[in-house]
Amino acid sequence: MDADTARAAFAEELRYIAHVKSGRVIEAFGAVRREAFWGQNPGRSRICRVAIGTRRRMIRVLPIIMCCSPSMPKGTSTTDIRSSGQRLLDRLNVKAGEKLYHVGAGTGYYTAIMAELVGRTGSVIAVEIDPDLSQRATLNLASYTNVEVVEGDGTVFDPGPVDVVIVNAGATLPMPISLSSLLPGGRLLEPLTADSGRGSVLRVERLASSNGFSAKFVLAVSIFPCAGARTPKAERALARALADGGQRFVQALRCDDHQREATCWLHGEGYCLSIHPVER
């Protein structure tokens, strides 16, 4: 089996392991050379430490295995093919020609998937705060003319008006810059996590009819923290809300100034996740 065949088989397997339904998402994962994001010499074999049962072993990984390995190298946003990355992209319904903002690009693997989804008529702005990872992402994504990699803080960088925002790190509150950047009909995916790194991914959509935001939690997640998008006060409030449960009833994100109400699942400073549906 050659690398292209192995990559295509891996992508097809996502239909069953990650429950991906979109054919466009399958094609995108099949098109991106995963092995290129493992390091500077993807054509050579590498020695990797992997878990085998309850023990860890050093094994030699060939490039063909990198194409379909369930693991990804340090610096990527998702570490297992059964995790959230593929399923979330499936639910986001990214369209060709859209402008996408990716916060937490890592080495750029998922940025490349997003670039495939928006196509040549679309564009991706990828921000990575870690200088080393940002440099690696820039090199890895050099062949993608529709991708711009920026080294910086994605919580304050202004990407301009965008159709989609994807945050690949755990925050304690919805990021204001991301919300203000969304065009009508725009969608945001952002993991909200407590200090344990566990939480749920929030999907927000700016409604074209009312300029309000619908919101719902779509998937449980465990992910590393997002620098600049966490405050102690917001983290305590989120931890209490997650412990109490009921996030499945959330239907709207409110950014208006109001007193806490019975419909407020999580009432913060300048934002509120409400169980009452947004007025359309």
Image (cartoon, rainbow, N blue to C red):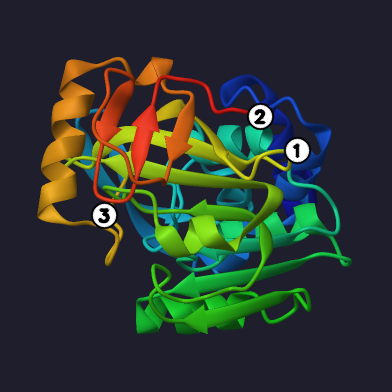
Query: What residue do we see at 59% from left, 27% from top?
Result: 279
Q: Earlier in the sequence, mark 3 or mark 1?
A: 1
Depicted 280 relative to depicted 262: above or below: below
- Three-letter amino acid code of the residue under disc 2: Arg
Residue that mark 2 sits on: 280
Snapshot quadrant of residue 75: bottom left
Query: What residue do we see at 27% from left, 18% from top?
Result: 262
Q: Earlier in the sequence, mark 3 or mark 2?
A: 3
Query: What residue do we see at 65% from left, 75% from top?
Result: 141
Number of callouts: 3
- Three-letter amino acid code of the residue under disc 1: Ile
218 with respect to 155 (left or right)? right
Residue that mark 1 sits on: 26
From the viewer's side, name the closer residue of 165 and 45. 165
274 with respect to 261 (left or right)? right
Residue that mark 3 sits on: 225
Q: Secondary structure at mark 1?
A: helix
Q: In the image as oriented, which residue stretches furthest toward the front?
A: 258
Disc 1/disc 2 C-alpha distance (Å)? 33 Å
Depicted 18 relative to depicted 62: above or below: above
Residue 83: image location, x then y, percent: 45, 34
Q: Cβ–Cβ below 8 Å for labels 3 and 1? A: no
Snapshot quadrant of residue 36: bottom right
Q: Which image quarter is the N terminus in?
A: top right
54 with respect to 41 (left or right)? left
Q: Earlier in the sequence, mark 1 or mark 2?
A: 1
Tell me if I can see residue 42 in this picture: no
Q: Residues within 10 Å of mark 3 (few under 14, many from 20)?
A: many
Residue 219: image location, x then y, percent: 45, 27
Residue 35: image location, x then y, percent: 60, 60
